[in-house]
Amino acid sequence: MLETKTFQPSVAYMVRSLFINRLEVSRLIAAAVVNAEFCNLLLKDPASALEDGYQDETFSFSETEKNFIGSIQADSLSGFAAQLSRSLNWIDASFDKLSVQSAEYIGY
């Protein structure tokens, strides 16, 4: 008898969608690089920077992402970006590890 295998997304896949949207992160950092006023707001009050957006642009982050970014405390844009980068690397490493575990569990 043939065994049917169905795709079941890992928990990491579902959790990953709750975290940082890389395109929006790039847009956020780019706005801070080209505009000192926006950069200062991002460092002083990240939640307001996300809510206000940059010029006529808004950022499409989920509430979870906004809360995460809003919790970053940094004195410089490089420090802010470093905290984001460390978090993204941790998410990637966790995702990769759980994806392998999930694939082994499913039998792939």
Image (cartoon, grey):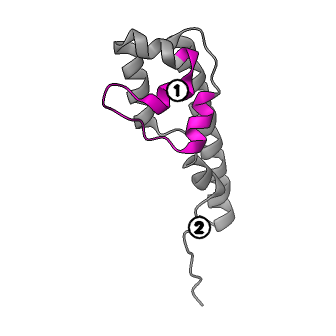
Position of 53 compared to 90: left or right? Answer: left
Q: Which quadrant holds residue 35? A: top left
Residue that extends furthest to the left in the rendered view of this protein: 56
Region in magenta? 43-70
Residue name at image x 57 percent, y 32 percent: 88
Query: Which quarter of the picture shows residue 3?
Result: bottom right
Q: Is residue 56 above or below residue 80?
A: below
Query: What is the number of the mark on residue 8?
Result: 2
Q: Which residue is mark 1?
A: 48
Residue at position x 57%, y 13% in the image: 79
> Which of 15 and 76 lies nearest the eye of the viewer?
76
Q: Quadrant of the C terminus?
A: bottom right
> Tag 1, which secondary structure?
helix
| Left or right, 106 with reference to 84 | right
61 left or right of 12?
Answer: left
Q: Is residue 89 visible?
A: no
Residue shown at 55% from the left, 15% from the top: 43
Q: Quadrant of the N terminus?
A: bottom right
Q: Give the amino acid type for the residue marked by disc 2 in the picture.
A: Gln
Viewer-closest of 40 and 65: 40
Q: Amino acid at mark 1?
A: Ser
Q: Residues within 10 Å of mark 1 (few under 14, many from 20)?
A: few
